[in-house]
């Protein structure tokens, strides 16, 4: 009997050694998905035929081919924003319910060719326009630690699939915190890579003017690093190229950095920080000090510095989806859509210019430090249906959710969310670490040290 919470790399080793067949793996996790999905809303589309075909193909592979596949026999999912030519790609929208992409996304091909077993496509809010996964075409993604609460968004379904043991790993996206916020809400590791690290081909060259990235999410730093090695790399003609790493990202897992100089931002003028979040963050900073690192409070408010430029680019990005019937759009997301339609080209260009100039200033302010620490979210996970508290307050409250994550979509720096304890109600909280531009190797090394100092992989939601 397989453990639903087995790490991806462990499952791969078992499959390579013949201790478990890919077919058995596929059947086990498909049953797990079918048993839990109606309660938790992780998957919009389950693909058993594809999973079994992947397993059959893997079982025919030679020993040498198996050894060359970094994800041999590891189940995964794709967010329903990722193009798949054989299955619908809906972007969480009723307007795209029957849309069939003309080609597979490059990352979908890379995950398949690496030996992964695709289980299906995960839920998301319409066009990624909410920080919670609800509204629009898909069912709400429910937090496995308490199904009355949000799993975060917009990669909420991906986070639920991993946190509930439906799959060891998942692929999502992050345009303002969309992989890190669900990781925080669900007690997972979610990495937003550097701009240009992972291609968006062939769907687009960039999303939200470079703010959005394709991302891995898993339960451990090692699995995230393993997944990044598979997903990473541009294709010819991409508008952004991150330089190749000095060595595979998975090697970062074994390195432990010493005597780092870390900055810490614990508050923002955008919204108050919940006292439980603040206490957990202060505890995290103290742990880093005990590991021998210097942690210095930094008086900087990145999202305030960026002003309205971030919301302008996000609203324009949401409005860029050509829809036949705007009345079908989730009423909350429609507010972003309608605002985006009113943005002039001149205003958009001005916002992008401000975003670039202020991002440069933020990176320069952070350059004396090896990394930055912040809470991932300033709030604890909210009950489903409570965000926004009132429709008229949506944009204001949205920025409150994004205040620690969104600035680093703007700067293009790699950022990771790691589990950082639980609230009194038993819901996870997250710690965000931000590294210098293109320094995923350094970021993953710091994350691995944190994971070793404050282990969490033995903690799982009680869902059966």
Image (tube, rainbow, N blue to C red):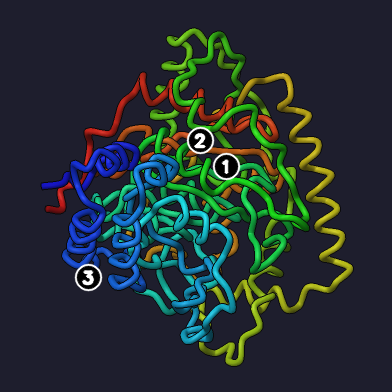
Pinpoint residue 399: horizontal percent, then vertical percent: 59, 54
Q: Nearer the viewer, mark 3 or mark 2?
A: 3
Q: Earlier in the sequence, mark 1 or mark 2?
A: 1
Q: Is residue 388 above or below residue 183?
A: below
Are the residues flagged by discs 1 and 2 in contact, CB closer than 8 Å?
Answer: yes
Residue drawn at x 55%, y 46% is 271
Judge the density around disc 3: few (<14), some (14-19), many (≥20) Cα neighbours within 10 Å. Answer: few
Q: Is residue 324 above or below residue 331?
A: below
Provide the residue designation for mark 1.
Answer: 404
Judge the density around disc 1: few (<14), some (14-19), many (≥20) Cα neighbours within 10 Å. Answer: many
- Left or right: residue 429 versus residue 242 is left
Q: Earlier in the sequence, mark 1 or mark 3?
A: 3
Pinpoint residue 343: horizontal percent, then vertical percent: 78, 73
Residue drawn at x 51%, y 76% is 85
Separation of disc 1 and disc 3 at Cα? Answer: 32 Å
Q: Nearer the viewer, residue 277 or 37?
A: 37
- Left or right: residue 1 versus residue 452 is left
Q: Earlier in the sequence, mark 3 or mark 2?
A: 3
* Residue 136: quarter of image: bottom left
Q: Nearer the viewer, mark 1 or mark 3?
A: 3
Q: Is residue 165 above or below residue 444?
A: below
Q: Nearer the viewer, residue 239 or 127?
A: 239
Judge the density around disc 2: few (<14), some (14-19), many (≥20) Cα neighbours within 10 Å. Answer: many
Separation of disc 3 and disc 2 at Cα? Answer: 31 Å
Q: Secondary structure at mark 2?
A: strand
Looking at this view, name the residue that lies furthest to the right.
346
């Amino acid at each position: 009997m397989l453990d639903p919470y087995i790490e991806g790399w462990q499952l791969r080793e078992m499959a390579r050694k013949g201790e478990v067949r890919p077919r058995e793996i596929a059947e086990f996790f498909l049953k797990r998905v079918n048993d839990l999905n109606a309660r938790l809303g992780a998957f919009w589309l389950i693909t058993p035929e594809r999973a079994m075909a992947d397993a059959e193909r893997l079982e025919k592979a030679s020993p040498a081919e198996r050894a060359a596949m970094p994800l041999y026999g590891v189940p995964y999912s794709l967010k329903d924003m990722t193009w798949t030519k054989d299955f619908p790609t809906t972007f969480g929208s009723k307007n795209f319910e029957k849309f069939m992409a003309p080609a597979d996304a490059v990352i979908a091909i890379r995950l398949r060719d690496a030996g992964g077993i695709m289980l299906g496509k995960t839920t998301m809010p319409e066009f990624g326009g909410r920080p919670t996964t609800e509204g629009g075409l898909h069912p709400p993604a429910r937090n496995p630690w308490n199904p009355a609460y949000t799993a975060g968004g917009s990669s909420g379904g991906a986070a639920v699939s991993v946190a509930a043991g439906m799959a060891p790993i998942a692929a999502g996206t992050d345009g303002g915190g969309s992989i890190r916020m669900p990781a925080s809400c669900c007690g997972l590791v979610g990495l937003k890579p550097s701009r240009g690290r992972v291609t968006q081909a062939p769907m687009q060259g960039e999303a939200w003017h470079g703010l959005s990235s394709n991302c891995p999410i898993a339960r451990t730093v090692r699995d995230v690093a393993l997944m990044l090695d598979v997903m990473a790399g541009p294709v010819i003609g991409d508008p952004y190229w991150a330089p190749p790493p000095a060595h595979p990202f998975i090697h970062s897992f074994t390195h432990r950095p010493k005597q780092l100089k870390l900055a810490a931002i614990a508050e923002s003028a955008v919204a108050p920080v919940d006292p439980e979040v603040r206490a957990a963050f202060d505890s995290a900073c103290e742990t880093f000090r005990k590991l021998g690192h210097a942690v210095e409070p930094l008086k900087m408010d990145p999202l305030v510095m960026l002003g309205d430029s971030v919301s302008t680019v996000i609203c324009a990005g949401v409005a860029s989806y050509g829809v036949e019937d705007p009345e079908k759009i989730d009423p909350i997301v429609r507010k972003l859509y309608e605002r985006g339609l009113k943005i002039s080209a001149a205003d958009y260009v001005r916002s992008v210019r401000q975003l670039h100039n202020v991002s440069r200033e933020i990176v320069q302010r952070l350059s004396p430090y090896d990394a930055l620490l912040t809470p991932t979210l300033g709030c604890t996970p909210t009950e489903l249906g409570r965000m926004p508290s009132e429709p008229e307050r949506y944009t204001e409250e949205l920025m409150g959710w994004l205040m620690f994550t969104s600035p680093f979509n703007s700067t293009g720096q790699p950022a990771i969310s790691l589990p950082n304890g639980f609230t009194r109600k038993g819901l996870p909280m997250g710690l965000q670490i931000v590294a210098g531009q293109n320094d995923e190797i350094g970021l993953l090394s710091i994350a691995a040290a944190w994971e070793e100092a404050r282990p969490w992989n033995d903690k799982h939601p009680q869902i059966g």
